[in-house]
């Protein structure tokens, strides 16, 4: 008899994919499968999304019935790792998107480098500042040499 | 004969100074990034893709190919020195290569790996030049139903050999194919899966997808695993003795043969070829040490097979438009960004590009050896750079790369979304790479399906009357039955 936690762990991955497939399926059914006897935009989309849902359910069923490993199909390693690095890296990208329209590329990249450096456990302030400065300088160099002239590098203007 | 002469002329034409420099740069940066553990060839290609944006198609193809095999090669150095392969195929090399390094023979091991890779690279370039043309001619005769069947077979094969289990990989491939359908429907011009977002009418960009799934998710995975080298084996002179060369020759030949043949089969990865080559060596007596205890054959055979397989995997892409593994799928997407559409008519329509690719394979492999033997010590020292120092730079360059394709902030939002998805999949213990395969092949599969149903007036039985399609379906059904029976037998 498997524990509730191991069952939950085994069903997590197929459940996530089934949810994604279901969302795709709902969207696919807003499109016609056939138009005047011809293949419409919805046909293949419906087949594929139904395939995602069906395979996820099959996967979940096999994972639930599997008494040996207690894990679902396709799981490489169970993950019980801290969320910090992932959140910091995604946060860095988010800050880039939010800052870019106001500050330009150099400042946005510097801020991103500071946040992602911190997330990568480079916590000493001097080391972090150096990473930020280096990233800013590299962005400036790339911006001046490789990017189109209209690219906004600074808050006030392109150059 | 005239074909060979014309091909040789095309080959000479593309060997300009600029193209040589591009090949050198691609091999160099591919090796530098490929050396870093945790960043595999697919992620390396994705990260360095923006470097090619300003190039013409031939130059871009040369550089992308050089990055591709540079990244493949880079992993063997870390495998030998640290027992920490940059990508999976290096695992096989590490079995004997790292033993050699621990015995104070890291230099000869790296040299044997480089020379075996060079031999295999040159041999498989000739193999591609000879075989790709006839296969492309044959593929032009295949009906849309047959091409749809071949794509389905390729996707199925990729799912079977993908890391993890086939069912999970197949589900992710189908999900990737759904993502590939986002945008304006090619048949009727209607928006599909766009959620009313105007920017999605052109579809999901390839760059945000791969940067999110590979660059961000792979970096997070590398940070979470936190595996960094503690001790680097002393290098010594990177040159083999005469006895080493003698011991390496026949295994390299056998590895090249196996790798070249297995690489053509969609779904076969370099690690499978390397494993097969090492397995074959068990049937032969090694002149120096037994396999697993630092035998030269344990380095030369898998390295030759790895390189030969990586290159001959280009054949199904160039002739059928069928990327057999995720790395080739990233390469295919990169080529599409440059307006190069690999497929049955690619070689006939673009003889200059095909010659550029072969030239890149030949010249690039020579450059790799010239580059890697003297610089092996430098690559080892790269590994001493703390990973946290590299992370901000990799993220910043990825962001600039994604943003600069269309100066679009929306692409960066997409990259963020796919980064989050990739991270979620990694935390669930899933490998996100099959999504890219589905993303690339989904639209092509739909196109052939649409054409087939158009010609047959909606009758799906045509898939069972077309010989290529029928054979593909039969193989899929038999393989599925075999997998189910094997699973039951094991239980």
Image: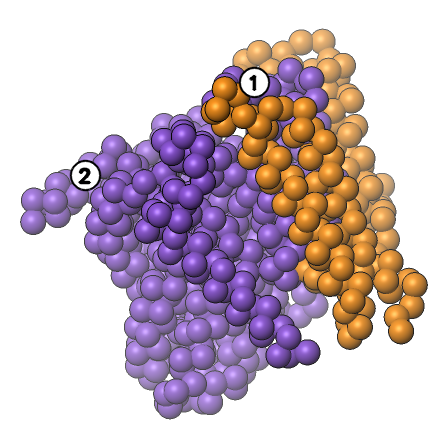
Chain colours: A orange, B purple
The residue identified by callout 1 is B190
The residue located at (76%, 57%) in the rendering is A60
Direction top: furthest residue: A156
The residue located at (30%, 76%) in the rendering is B249
Q: Taking B337 as reference, is B249 above or below it?
A: below
Closest to the observer, B479 or A94: B479
- Circles 1 and 2, Cβ within 8 Å, touching? The answer is no
- Under circle 1, the secondary element is loop
Q: Which mark is residue A151?
A: none
The residue identified by callout 2 is B10
- Under circle 2, the secondary element is helix
Q: Residues within 10 Å of mark 1 (few under 14, many from 20)?
A: some
Image position of B491 (left or right of B289): right
The residue located at (55%, 43%) in the rendering is B438
Closest to the observer, B104 or B14: B14
Q: Taking B351 as reference, is B312 above or below it?
A: below
Q: Earlier in the sequence, mark 1 or mark 2?
A: 2
Q: CA distance from mark 1 to mark 2?
A: 42 Å
Picture coordinates of residue B49 (x, y %)? 51, 37
Q: Chain of mark 2?
A: B
Closest to the observer, B172 or B479: B479
Picture coordinates of residue B200 (x, y %)? 62, 22
Q: Residues within 10 Å of mark 2 (few under 14, many from 20)?
A: some
Picture coordinates of residue B93 (x, y %)? 50, 71
The residue located at (45%, 40%) in the rendering is B460
Quadrant where the C terminus of chain B sits is bottom right
Closest to the observer, B475 or B430: B475
Image position of B191 (left or right of B311): right
Q: Nearer the viewer, mark 1 or mark 2?
A: 1
Image position of B211 (left or right of A99): left
């Amino acid at each position: 008899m498997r524990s509730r936690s191991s069952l939950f762990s085994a069903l997590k991955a197929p459940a996530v994919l089934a949810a994604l497939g279901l969302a795709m399926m709902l969207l696919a059914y807003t499109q016609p499968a056939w138009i005047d006897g011809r293949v419409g935009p919805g046909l293949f989309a419906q087949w594929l999304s139904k395939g995602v849902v069906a395979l996820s359910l099959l996967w979940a069923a096999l994972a639930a019935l599997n008494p040996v490993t207690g894990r679902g199909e396709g799981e490489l390693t169970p993950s019980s790792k801290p969320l910090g690095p992932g959140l910091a890296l995604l946060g860095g990208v988010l800050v880039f998107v939010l800052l870019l329209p106001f500050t330009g590329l150099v400042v946005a990249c510097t801020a991103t480098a500071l946040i992602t450096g911190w997330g990568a456990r480079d916590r000493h302030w001097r080391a972090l500042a150096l990473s930020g400065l280096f990233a800013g300088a590299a962005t400036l160099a790339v911006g001046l040499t490789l990017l189109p002239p209209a690219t906004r590098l600074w808050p006030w203007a392109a150059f | 004969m005239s074909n060979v002469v014309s091909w040789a002329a095309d080959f000479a034409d593309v060997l300009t100074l600029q193209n040589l420099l591009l090949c050198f740069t691609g091999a160099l940066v591919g090796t530098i990034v490929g050396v870093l553990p945790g960043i595999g060839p697919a992620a390396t290609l994705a990260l360095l893709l923006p470097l090619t944006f300003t190039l013409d198609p031939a130059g871009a193809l040369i550089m992308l190919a050089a990055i591709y095999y540079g990244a493949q090669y880079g992993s063997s150095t870390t495998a030998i020195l640290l027992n920490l392969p940059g990508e999976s195929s290096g695992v096989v090399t590490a079995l004997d290569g790292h033993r050699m390094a621990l015995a104070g023979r890291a230099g000869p091991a790296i040299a044997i790996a480089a020379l075996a890779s060079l031999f295999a690279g040159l041999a498989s370039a000739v193999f591609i030049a000879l075989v790709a043309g006839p296969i492309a001619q044959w593929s032009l005769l295949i009906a849309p139903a047959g091409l749809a069947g071949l794509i389905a077979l390729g996707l199925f094969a990729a799912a079977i050999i993908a890391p993890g289990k086939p069912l999970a990989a197949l589900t992710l491939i189908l999900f990737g194919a759904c993502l590939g359908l986002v945008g304006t429907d090619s048949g009727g011009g209607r928006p599909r899966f766009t959620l009313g977002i105007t920017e999605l009418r052109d579809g999901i960009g390839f760059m945000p997808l791969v940067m999110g799934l590979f660059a961000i998710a792979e970096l997070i995975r590398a940070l979470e695993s936190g595996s960094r080298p503690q001790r680097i084996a002393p290098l010594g002179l990177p040159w083999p003795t005469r006895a080493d060369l003698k011991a390496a020759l026949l295994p390299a030949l056998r590895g090249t043969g196996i790798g070249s043949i297995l690489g053509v089969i969609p779904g076969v990865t370099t690690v499978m070829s390397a494993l097969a080559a090492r397995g074959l060596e068990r049937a032969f007596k090694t002149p120096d040490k037994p396999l697993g205890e630092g035998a030269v054959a344990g380095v030369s055979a898998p390295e030759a097979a790895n390189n030969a397989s990586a290159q001959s995997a280009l054949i199904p892409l160039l002739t059928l438009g069928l990327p057999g593994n995720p790395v080739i799928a990233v390469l295919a997407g990169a080529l599409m960004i440059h307006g190069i559409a690999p497929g049955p008519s690619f070689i006939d329509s673009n003889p200059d590009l095909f010659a550029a690719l072969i030239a890149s394979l030949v010249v690039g492999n020579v450059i790799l050896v010239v580059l890697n033997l003297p610089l092996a010590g430098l690559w080892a020292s790269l590994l001493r750079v703390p990973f946290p120092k590299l992370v901000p730079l990799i993220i910043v360059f990825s962001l600039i790369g994604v943003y600069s394709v269309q100066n679009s902030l929306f692409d960066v939002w997409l990259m963020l979304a796919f980064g989050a998805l990739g991270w979620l999949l990694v935390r669930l213990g899933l490998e996100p790479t099959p999504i890219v395969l589905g993303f690339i092949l989904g639209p092509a599969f739909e196109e052939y399906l649409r054409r087939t149903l158009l010609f047959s007036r909606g009758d799906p039985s045509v898939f069972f009357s077309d010989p290529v399609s029928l054979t593909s379906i039969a193989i899929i059904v038999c393989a599925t039955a075999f997998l189910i029976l094997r699973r039951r037998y094991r239980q």
